[in-house]
Image: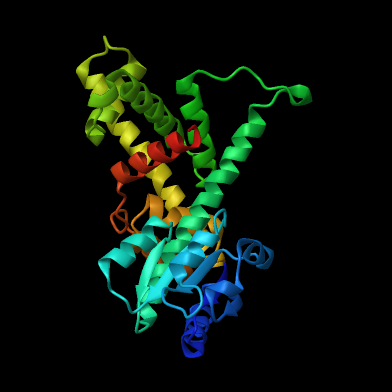
Amino acid sequence: MRYFIVDDDPAIRSMLAHIIEDADLGEVAGEAEDGSLIDKNYLELKGVDILLIDLLMPNRDGIETVRHLSGFSGRVVMISQVESKDMIAEAYSQGIEYYITKPINRLEVISVLQKVRERILLQRSIEGIQRSLSVLTQGAGGERKEQPVPDRTIRTAGKFLLTELGMIGESGSKDLLDMLDYLYRMEKEEAGDYKFPALKDIFASVAAEKLGWQAAAADVQKEVKAAEQRVRRAIYQALTHLASLGLTDYAHPKFESYATTFFDFTEVRKRMKELETHIEPAPSSIRINAKKFILVLYLEAKRLIG
């Protein structure tokens, strides 16, 4: 990530730059002492991802500067000791991402900038998948193929996400794709009355569809248990894949985008420690939140297809 700091106090600029570099959050691309010294083109030329800007400055304040940055593709974090609710509300209305109060608190700065980085990386990852999906829907000679029906579209998006998570080869991935088909169809049918179902109901409905609605209850229950095991193994593989990426490169885009989105990060850290120390985990040592994973998978797949 590349940062640009705008503040009329050189001590604040120096402190922020030190925090960014010391916490390995990225690099500082430049600094300025007033908002009048920057514009959209200058920041784009510098390749700025995140702009940190003071609210009150002598020539052009932070809010006025943000107004002049219309079209800036980066994110804006405002810094000030002013605690006026009206001014803070005005700042947010202009599109700032977060508001950091002075005096500068190192932990607050790191926490805020990490959240902004996660949003940027997630957005970039989603845009990359959307571009890949767009390529797949192109026919020979660049002509666009006929669009697939909706339930296949959600399935295609799901395949990309499962591939990104390193679990597409697991048998449980097919169960997860069947769940996406089911959830998408149910949401379309129930429209405004749709409520995300309980996990046991998802498994039961998908099992019944797979075996046929005339199947015996015992057979459906047997399939539910088998599917639960397959899905949990597949999710565990995704967790292991992300933990491996984190050990290799903590700033890896996939790790930063997906580790905290699909999983509780405490479980990711636990799995990273197991891999690092070559400890074979006990079956119950890692808590797999299957419902959270399936919900996030569904929401992300829906977002990919617009």
| Residue 25 in sight | yes
For residue 144, what is the image quadrant?
A: top right
Q: Residue at x 23, y 29 (%)?
A: 201
Q: Between residue 18 and residue 265, name the one nearer to us.
A: 18
**Picture coordinates of residue 146, whole percent (x, y):** 62, 17
Q: Between residue 275 and residue 177, name the one nearer to us.
A: 177
Q: Between residue 301 and residue 123, name the one nearer to us.
A: 123
In the displayed structure, would residue 112 be above or below residue 230?
A: below
**Picture coordinates of residue 61, whole percent (x, y):** 46, 72
Most extreme residue toward the bottom, as rendered?
11
Most extreme residue toward the right, as rendered?
141
With 75 as the anchor, is 294 left or right in this view? left
In the displayed structure, would residue 25 be above or below residue 257?
A: below
Tally of marks = 0
Q: Residue at x 55, y 19 (%)?
A: 148
In the displayed structure, would residue 112 be above or below residue 199?
A: below
Q: Residue at x 45, y 62 (%)?
A: 116
**Picture coordinates of residue 205, whole percent (x, y):** 28, 23
Q: Quadrant of the N terminus?
A: bottom right
With 284 as the anchor, is 254 left or right in this view? right
With 87 as the anchor, is 278 left or right in this view? right
Q: Between residue 88 and residue 125, name the one nearer to us.
A: 88
**Picture coordinates of residue 135, whole percent (x, y):** 66, 33
For residue 88, what is the image quadrant?
A: bottom left
